[in-house]
Every structure is written in structure tokens, then in C-alpha cells.
Image (cartoon, rainbow, N blue to C red):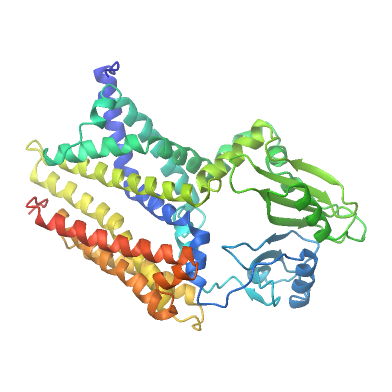
Amino acid sequence: MKLKALNPRVHNILFHTHTVAGIVISFALFVIFYAGAFALFRDELYQWENHRARQVKIQKVDTDEVLRQVEAQYPDFKKSGQTSIVYNSDSQPYIQFYADLETDDKRNNRIRALINPETWEITDNRKPLTTVGETLYHLHYFDQIPEFGIWISGFVSLFFLFAIVTGVLIHWKNIIRKFYAFSIRKKLKNIWTDAHTMLSIIGLPFQVIYAVTGCLFGLLTLLLAPSVVLMFQGSTDPIYENIQPQRTMRPNEDAKNANMLSITNIYDDLQKEFPNHTIQNAQTIHYGYEDATISFRIDDGKGIVNDGNLVYSLASGERIAEILPNNKTYTQTVYNLMTKLHFATYGGILLKMIYFILAMITCFSIISGVMIWKTARDKSNYSMKQKRFHHQVTKVYLAICLGLFPATALLFIANKAIPFSIENRAFYENAVFFGGWLVLILIGLFWNDLKQLNVKYLIIGGIASLLIPTLNGLVTGDWFFIAFAKAKYIIASIDIFWLLTGISALWIAHLSNQSKVKNSIP
């Protein structure tokens, strides 16, 4: 199948801009996709992380009782402020609670707590016991970089979208032929080029989704700024009114005290109205006053537009705003659609697995793109000084990217190796992860041969991967076959994943070692 080719001059311009854009963002983009792939399973990882702790039986929650218990625990609890309650689920058996405290201490004026629905024991969640899923989730948009991390991820996504478009255009003429042209019997540069093209074509729709949604979430503030200033006189309320009506609710300072209706009764009526949906969270504003409101978010976890948001008056019980499932405006549909596409919250565990595989394919496409850039510069028209520079840049990029694999395994190992009784254990987990990643990067800089760099990271990562199910079995007694027999399928699956990953990494390292190809600069 032959398609019309680009003008040679346009092709050259796009080719070089594609190369520059790709090489500039490559290591950051790899981190985003690699960490994001694991972040898809954040809820499932929570079960694996915490199954040493006492298991809590999932049961219906009395929302009014939640507020009473928090008020008893925190005398300075600002009940009339904005209060958020995330209801418990199979993956998160504890209720998550967020609210303000009436205190002068600005560093400690917020409640972030986990509530046991059986015993009503309240635990401060600002220093969580475990952090595997959360660490990888926050890493995938560089939240560890204060203030600017999410903007960096947004700009990386923007450049990624540019690289995708230019990549499609420069390969447009022979895009179908190149897809079937891959062979490991070609020259090294051709192998990297064909692998890059073939895998990019396979993951193209997935990559476009993440380029667009990543740009939207990372740069949302900048994207909305012109509209807010020019069209709405600096107010964001008209924008949020259609997509998140609860965010436009403002407490009336002149409102009088009033008796509140039972939130649990409103919850029950809502559940009867939408029996196939789960009420995920609730948010109260100005509780105890005549203008008090509560909003509920509902979702069936299956359909891509089957979520909704409903706001009630707590004084009258009247529904004052609503976004109903399968009955939304274009604006309401687009924003929630982007959210579901990005976080894969609409197709169950199977969709998350597909997303994970496509994310790993994208990671390989990124690495292959770096290798294309490097091998294309091994030609005789480049001086030895230039070749050394290109080699060093490639080595740094590969060390950052490939070192993340064994570092992630170290994070899982730390979760099982560090006792639950240690204070601030989440800090030590993160220290092992980020410290281990840094050490692995620095060690990689001493390996001059790129093939051996790859092999050694695979060996380290493979061994570390095998240690995860082994350590989990020794520490908790839940060996993957025992966990599977006890119907703890998520715990068993994560251990099996790391077992297969370790075996695969060591096998690939063995095959690579048998190859006589070297890639180093004296």
C-alpha cells in the first residue's frame, strides 16, 4: 500500500524536529510511562502492600457517624468547612477523610485520616505506613518536584504529541510496509529503526490518548488562564459549573444555623435510584448552616460515560445540581471522558492489563528511539569527539531509564523488608527507592559498553524481581500459591508478575550475552 509522500524539504524539517523533540523528552517520557503503568494498579497494590495489617471487613458506612467520630477525635474539626469522604471499597477497606482544622498552625491545619469502619479507629494518614502505589503514582507526573513537577509532565506530554504527529507524517508513505518489515537479521541501526516504527504503530492510539490527556491535566491551569481572564473576568466558576458543580458552591457568611438532614438517608435514596452504581465519595460544604450542601460522585466502573455527580441541600434534601450518567452535555462528557481514558477506570482489571502492556511497549519505543539517534551518529562524518559526546548522552539516558526497573523492584522489596512497627516507614521505603535509583544510575555511568549496561541492569532487576515474591512469602506467609488458594487473587497475581518478570529479565540478559555485538566508544 503506497501513500503520497511528503515534499523532501518538509520531510527533512519534520524528521529533524521529530528527532530533537524525541531525544529532549525521552528519559522524562520513559519515567512517566513506566511509573504510570504501575500507577494504574494503585488500588490493587494497596492490598499487596497492606495485607500484613489486620484485615477489615467491607461494610456499609454511616456517614453521619463518620462526622461524629471525627469531631470527637479532633475537637478543632471545622465541620462547617469543606469536608471530603472517600468511601471504603474492596481495594481500600478504610474510609479516607479530609477536612480543615480551626488552628493557627498553618503547617498542621488539615485532617488527612484513615478510618476503620469496624472499630472507628482513626489514623493520621499524613505519615502513611506504606507508599508503593502512591510513590509511583506521584512520580508519573513528577509530583516530587515542588510546584513545577506537574507542569514539566504537561510540557513533556505536549512535546510527545508533537513527536507523534511528526513521526506519523515522516513515515506516512511506507507506514504499512515498514510495519511488516521488522527482522532481527538486519544491521543494528535498521533493527532499532524497524522496532521503533513497528511498536509505535501498535501503540499509536494509546500514545495519542496519553499525549492529549497528559497535556490537559499537566497544563490545565495554563490552558484555562486565557479563558478565565478574557471571558469570565478572572472567575473559574463558569468553567467548573458544568463539569464539577460542587466546586462552585460558596458558603454564605450570613447563613443561619439549621438542622441537617441525615446524610445516610440521602445516601440510601441515591443508592436505590442508581442500584448499579457505586457511590465513591461525598463532599460537604458549610455543614450545620441553612445553605449546607453535599455532593456525591457515582460510577459503575464499566462504562466510559457512566459516572455522575449529584448535589443536595442538607437543609431541605432537595437536589440542587446534577450530572447524570449517560445524560451529559458535551462539556461534561469530554472532561470526565479524558479522566477515565487517562486512569483506565472504565473497563475493569483487563483494561488495566492492556494499558500496562501498551505502556511497556511505549517504553521500548522510547529506548529504541534513543538508540536510533545514537547509531545514526556513529558514521564517519562525525568526529571522535562528537561520537564520544553522543555515546555519553545515550549512556546517561539509558542509565536513568533502565535503572528504574531494578529501583522499582527495590521499592517492592523495601515494603516487605521494613517492619510495620517502624516510625515513618514510608519515608524509608522512598529512601530505598530514590536512593537505590540514584546509585544504579551512577553505577551505570561506569559501564561504557551499552549492551553490557543493558544486560547488567536486566540481571540486577531480574534478581531483585525474584526476591519480591520470595520475601513476601517469608515475611507474611502468603506465598503466591497459598494466597491463590485463599482466593487472594490480587496478592497472588502481583507476586506471580514479579516472578515471571525476574525469569524473563534473566533469560533476555542471557540471550543478549550470547550476542557478539558491542556498542562502546573507547
User: In front here: 318 or 264?
Assistant: 264
Percent position (x, y) of residue 95? Answer: 66, 66
Q: Residue at x 30, y 44 (%)?
A: 366
Q: Is residue 354 left or right of residue 305?
A: left
Percent position (x, y) of residue 198? Answer: 27, 36
Percent position (x, y) of residue 430? Answer: 43, 69
Q: Is residue 80 left or right of residue 500?
A: right
Percent position (x, y) of residue 149? Answer: 47, 53
Query: Of all residues shown, which one is farthest toward the front?
Result: 485
Q: Which residue is drawn at 34% across and 44% down?
A: 362
Query: Of all residues shown, which one is farthest toward the bottom?
Result: 421
Question: Is residue 449 shown to the viewer in this render?
Answer: no
Q: Which residue is drawn at 72% across and 48% down?
A: 247
Which quarter of the rendered picture does the N terminus lie within? Answer: top left
Which quarter of the rendered picture does the C terminus lie within? Answer: bottom left
Q: Residue at x 32, y 43 (%)?
A: 24
- Relative height, residue 433 to residue 140 (above, below): below
Residue 54: name its quadrant: bottom right
- Relative height, residue 181 to residue 433 (above, below): above
Residue 106: name its quadrant: bottom right
